[in-house]
Amino acid sequence: MRNVIQLAHISLDGFMAGPGGDMSFITMNQEIADYAYPLMDSVDTAVYGRTTYQMMQGYWPGQLDNKNATAHERKHARWYIDVAKLVASRTLPAGSDPKLKICKDDIVEQLAAEKRKPGGDIMIFASPTLVHTLAKHDLIDEWRINIQPVAIGGGLPLFSGHRTQLALRSTKTFSSGVIATHYTTKRS
């Protein structure tokens, strides 16, 4: 069975985005990129909520030809273009990209089916509302959480309305004060 990994940046007080979706509190620099981008080497399917997908789609394809993009950014842009994508959205139309699947009301069933197929890891990027649903259905196996050294006081939380037991696997502290944590979901 394939592994489903949640990758998120959160504030010290547990929010993935501030009020109105503000994510300006997130530190992403070369040191963090050197750590984070290789995590995707085993991933062949990306999962997004609509908002995160539209943000990624509006940014990453343009980085391939951006002369100011770093080598990591260009590599990630290539990965983004090539990876299979599941997007939870009731409003996005089906696209012509064979690597893109829009999941209307059946993201839980679709992700459960993807887990049973052969292949690489599956990674969920940000998408707090989607994470709440998938965690409630016990579909997330690993949690890669980058804790930002800031409390923002409110917004969209990583966890909401469910209890999830986690086992710490590793931590890494960066010079910016960001702490990368790696947890696995404890199951009985």
Image: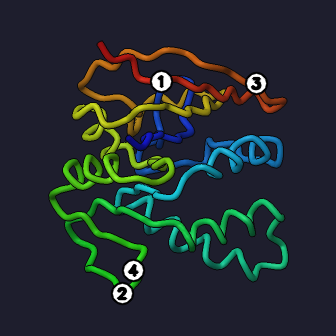
The residue tagged 2 is 96
Q: Position of residue 145 (x, y in %)?
A: 56, 32
Q: Which mark is residue 18?
A: none
Please state if 72 lies on the left or on the right of 163 as rendered. Answer: right
For the residues labelled 4 and 3, the Cα–Cα distance comes to 39 Å
The residue tagged 4 is 98
Image vertical order of residue 98 relative to residue 183, above or below: below
Q: Looking at this view, name the residue that lies furthest to the front.
A: 118
Within 10 Å of the Cα at label 2, are there few (<14), some (14-19), or many (20+) other Cα atoms?
A: few
For the residues labelled 1 and 4, the Cα–Cα distance comes to 31 Å
Count of numbered tags: 4
The residue tagged 1 is 184
Q: Are marks 4 and 3 in contact (CB under 8 Å)?
A: no
Amino acid at dot 1: Thr
Which of pointers 1 and 3 indicates the residue nearer the eye?
A: 1
Q: Position of residue 7 (x, y in %)?
A: 53, 41
The residue tagged 3 is 173
Amino acid at dot 4: Pro
First reached walking from the N terminus: tag 2 or tag 1: 2
For the residues labelled 2 and 1, the Cα–Cα distance comes to 35 Å
Amino acid at dot 3: Thr
Q: Position of residue 62 (x, y in %)?
A: 65, 79
Q: Nearer the viewer, residue 52 or 166?
A: 166
Residue at 80% over, 69% down: 69
Please state if 146 lies on the left or on the right of 66 as rendered. Answer: left
Q: Nearer the viewer, residue 8 or 96?
A: 96
Q: Nearer the viewer, residue 157 or 183?
A: 183
Tag 2's secondary structure? Answer: loop
Q: Looking at this view, name the residue that lies furthest to the bottom.
A: 96
